[in-house]
Structure formats: C-alpha cells, structure tokens
Image (cartoon, rainbow, N blue to C red):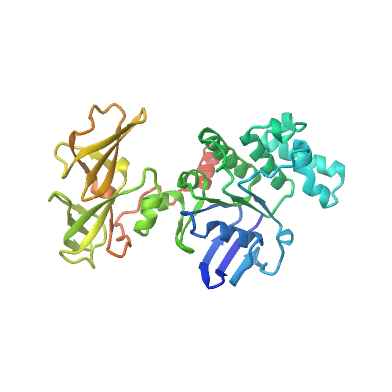
Amino acid sequence: MATLQLDQVVKSFGDTQVIKGIDLDIQDQEFVVFVGPSGCGKSTLLRMIAGLESTTAGDINIDNQRVNELGPAERGLAMVFQSYALYPHMTVEDNMGFSLKLAGVSREDRRTKVMEAARILQLEPLLERKPKALSGGQRQRVAIGRAIVRNPRIFLFDEPLSNLDAALRVQMRIELARLHEELKATMIYVTHDQIEAMTMADKIVVLQGGVVEQVGSPMELYHHPRNRFVAGFIGSPKMNFLNAVAEEGSAQGVTVRLPGGGSVSIPVDGGQVSEGQALDVGVRPEHLRLDDSGPLKAQINVIERLGGQTSLYVEMDDELITLMVDGDVAHRVGDVVQFGFDPSRAHLFSADGLALQSLSRHPLASLTRQDNRVASETEA
C-alpha cells in the first residue's frame, strides 16, 4: 500500500481560501477519517488528494513522490463516492470489472480479480444480478468492489454510507472495518458523522473552516480534546458546557464556582488561571450522575427513553444540559433533580476555547483499532 504526506496544502476558489495550509502524515495501512461539519473542507481535501481538484499551494506526496501534477489515473488511487453510480444494464460482475476492461486487462485476469473482490465482499451469489435487483448495502459493496479490483495504493471514501438507512449504516461500518483488516490497506474516509469516525478510524482528523483542529486516535480526541470545538464535536450526545468562574488556580488544579454556587476542583494545569476568570467546564452526558447531594440542580424539560439508557434534558444558564442515566429511572418532566460529576472526568476551557492541560493521561487515550488487533493476535 502507501503513505501520504500533505505539506502546507492550500486550496482557493478565487479570493476564497477553503483549505488553509494543512500538514498531515498518513502511514501505511492506517484507516484515517476526515470529520467535521458541512463546509469545513473535508471533501475538497479528499478530492485534492485524488487529483480531482488542483492544489493552489503546497505539496501532496504519495510514497515520498510529489503528485501535484499527476492526473487521477496516474496516482494509483481508487475513490468510492456517496452515489453508487453503477451501470444499470450491466451485471454485478461486469460493473466490478469494467475499469479493468477499459485498461485492456484480459478477460481471464479480470474474472480472477473480480472473483477475489466478490469473495472479500461476500458478493459471490450476486454476480449475475443487475443493480435494480440489489439492496442499497449490496450496491455500495459493488461500488467498493470496483475499487478493490484496481488494487489501488490508497482507498478514498467520500461519505459512502450517507444514502443508507440507519441499520445498513451500522452493518456497512462493520464490513468496512473488516475489509480494512483483510486488505491491510491505507484508507482515507470522509464523513460528517462522528460516530462513523469513532467506530472505524485508527486516526481522526477534525477539520473546521479549512483548518485541522486536532489529529489523534478516537479515544485521544474523546478523552483529551485540545479545544472546545473538538470536545463538542466528538462524542454522542455532545459534551455539556457549564459557565464557571475560577476561585483558585495552581499547577495542581483549578477550583471553580459552578452555576448555583457549588464549587469543585478539577485536576488540570491552572498555573495561568487567575481568580475571577470566566471558564467553561465540559462534562460528557454519560459522566453526569444523579446525586441528591450534587452541586447542580435543574428542572427536567424533556425525557427520551432509549431502553437501556434514558436521556434527561435540563436547562442551566440558557445552556441545554444532557444527562445519560439508567433506563429505568422514574423521573418525569417537571421534576427538579440534583446531579454532579467526577472532577477527573471533567474538562476546563479558557475564554479562547483552548483546553487546560489535564494532569492525568487516560490509559485508553492512544488506543486504536490496530492496537486491538495486535493485542488479539498476541493473546492468540
């Protein structure tokens, strides 16, 4: 497979700069996900890597070779789009092998490559069907099969699951992760869905406004977001933010006054924090807990019962706060609840949105799917 390096890559459309000097290293066999809100530049960046968009400035290197001037066909990449774009009059086998036919590959070699891709994607019983006889998930697998037969250096995926229903998206996430393990391939995947990013990636690249906000493993971004944007984007439901005021700060931690007057000491480096400074406390919904002696109190506005878990929505200082609690909780809309949190699970953000450095490193922060695979193989 291949490595990829982006060196101060810029893309402008007229006077509008949409990609603003991105540096990025992608290693061989990594599954990297570009994630961010609509308009952040993730699809444009992917198209630049593919050669479908020109580069205004900077270098794109594949296996240490500059490819800025190479066309899409010369870069050795394969791209899977949101739209399946299958030929309706062709069978699955013909759709998967069509690019090889155009390239002059013999019929025997085409069939060998198609049959291997069909085995990997579990499409062997469907090879004689036409697209109209396939489900959405099967059509997407055929589109992926077209990429596999080309034996690309890097696979590129541009929101390939967004046309599928919720159940199929879950199934296809599992199949793509399995595919990555089997092919030992370098894959770059674009999505706006942070759940897809968290469940599939070895490394996540969070983009906002054409700038990389943070790069790291899923658990690194979950436990140690570098700013409020990443903290609020990674995790579902999103992180809660509480307005707070610093009472005392030191290199050993920061004591803050919470809404309602309660105080809590958070283990972050507060050496630069001054008394009276406005801060934001970030706590994930799953880390808030109902507690009759907790420092926070609010009235329940909405309840969502999800079976094993229940979401309680309360409002504090014009901020909507979400608590993920046990599914059998007996509270009703209108009830006033008290709650709190473990300070070691909390995050603290300054007025400019940057996170204050945590004094403890979470043991799972750097864990990736590759680490899980290695551990499993070692145990076996």
Q: Is residue 115 visible?
A: no
Q: Is residue 299 above or below residue 305?
A: below
Residue under the point 50% across and 43% down: 372
**Which quarter of the figure has residue 160?**
top right
* Front residue of this view, candidates 353 and 152: 353
Say which quadrant the C terminus sits in.
top right
Counting labels gives: 0
Residue displayed at 14% across by 49% down? 260
Q: Is residue 370 visible to the viewer in this orientation of the structure?
A: yes
**Residue at the spot 36% in from the left edge and 27% down from the top edge:** 307
- Indicate left or right for 201 with 87 as reference: left
Would residue 376 be found to the left or right of residue 113 on screen? left
Residue 270's x, y, as percent?
A: 23, 63
Camera-side residue of 183 and 81: 81
- Residue 106 against residue 252 in the figure, above or below: above
| Residue 275, percent from left and from top | 15, 65
Q: Is residue 336 left or right of residue 135?
A: left
Rendering coords of residue 338 (x, y %): 17, 39
The quadrant of the picture occupied by the N terminus is bottom right
State the residue at coordinates (19%, 64%). Answer: 277
Instruction: Point out residue 179 in the picture as x, y percentages from the top left corner.
Output: 62, 41
Left or right placement of residue 339 versus residue 142 in this view: left
Give whichever of 74, 375 is nearer the camera: 74
**Residue 253, relative to residue 368: is it above or below?**
below
Which of the 4 image quadrants contains residue 334? top left
